[in-house]
Image: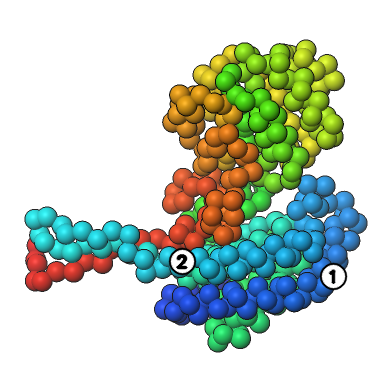
Amino acid sequence: MNHDSPLTIAQAAKAASIELANTDPSRLASVLESLAALIAGESAEILAANQLDIDAARRSDLPPAKLQRLALTQADIASLARSVRAVSALQAPQGVITSDTIAQPSGLRVQKVRMPLGVIAMIYEARPGVTVDAFSLCLRSGNACILKGGREAAHSNAALMSLIERALVQHGLARASAQLVTTSDRAVLAELLACEGLIDLVIPRGGAELVSFVRQHSRIPVLAHDRGVCHIYVHADADLDMAERICVSAKVAAPATCNAAECVLVDRAVAEQFLPRLCKALADRGVEIRGDAATCKAWPAATPACESDFGAEFLSLVIAVRVVDDLGEALAHIRHHSSNHTEAIITTSQAAQAEFAKCVHSSCVVINASTRNNDGASLGLGAEIGISTSRLHAYGPMGLCELTTQRFIVTGNGQIR
């Protein structure tokens, strides 16, 4: 754990970011290869540290959703190592020329080139895996990072950070390229958020209270990774076997994640046929169904929904179900209740697919697939630092390119103006 003052931490990160921006990307990739090997080789130590956090969390009655996010398994650690290797194998974005034109009438050659953002402060809760994902993506894109993990994962994060530091030192890079801050003192966090000019971007990833605190106190640009109120609309022309499989999996596979389905909208044209089978499949897997009047009529065991259930992020085995008259009503419901995270449509109609994609403006629109696919690994990003529900400067899963900006390099032969 870093006990330096927020200002000292930010200053060290700024100095490290300058070094990283000028480091050969292949060297950064080598750091990640070493880290992946360390994670795989030290799994017993990581699991032991994680167990300390789990034991403390149970004593403090941490909510089940957070407890699920906190826990690591041997499979999770193997997945972390694979994720680090996947990021290492991706093309580094820094230095990539994204545009190369000749301006008219001046004749200037105008290039747009990707460059690191600089210093990224990541503030997150529970998930210790975020420590590794955030570091991997920041380093591969040439950024320094300050990682403010939650106190509930203090032992896990410290164990993972020790491996990160070993990998950095092994390749001759500054320890300040990645710094872990675990204090729960909000006053210290507020000091960190005031380090304007040293930190370039703040990414809060957690509950509404955390995101609100960061937005209120930060003097640095904030890219929020907010609630995931994800919808699936079962259209009149849906393949109902596919729809059942997707809806059930999107709810039960990992209910505590932000890309899990929280609401299913069923077109009235197929409701009588589809609702009993959907509700039975969900109930068989322990899901509590909170339905509107039409849903409760089709499945009397459903709990009558109140209006606040639509727009709720349950993060558990609870789902809201509503019958809608048509695509237009489904779109209106989503506009009103969406958190701009992920929305899906199940339909064989290409016209409905196109209309849904055009009218839904969430960070990810999914057609005939689960909302859980809004994920960095699923979308080929290797990993993600989070899923942005802000629209500037990135929207959706944030991979390597989203941790860079673009600048102009202009070449002339004497032009003046």
Q: Element under label 1?
A: helix
Is residue 181 left or right of 139 when viewed as pictured? right
Q: Which mark is residue 389?
A: none
Residue at 10 percent of width and 71 percent of height? 413
Amino acid at dot 1: Ala
- Quadrant placement of the C terminus: bottom left
Residue at 85 percent of width and 60 percent of height? 54
Where, by quadrant of the figure, is residue 92 drawn? bottom left
Q: Earlier in the sequence, mark 1 or mark 2?
A: 1
Residue under circle 1?
48
Indicate the position of residue 360 as horizontal and vertical percent values.
Answer: 49, 31
Residue at 21 percent of width and 62 percent of height? 110
- Quadrant placement of the N terminus: bottom right
Is residue 92 left or right of 261 when viewed as pictured? left
Q: Compare residues 187 and 161 and report the one nearer the observer.
A: 161
Check disc 1: other Cα within 10 Å, few if <14, some if 14-19, many if 20+: some
Q: Element under label 2?
A: loop
Give the label, 1 or 2, closer to the camera: 2
Residue under circle 2?
91
Residue 410 in the image: above or below residue 285? below
Is residue 348 left or right of 100 when viewed as pictured? right
Residue 331 in the image: above or below residue 113? above
Indicate the position of residue 297 as horizontal and vertical percent values.
Answer: 78, 12
Q: Compare residues 157 and 45 and report the one nearer the observer.
A: 45
Indicate the position of residue 326 as horizontal and vertical percent values.
Answer: 56, 16
Which residue appears farthest toward the right when viewing the image?
59
Indicate the position of residue 289 as horizontal and vertical percent values.
Answer: 78, 27
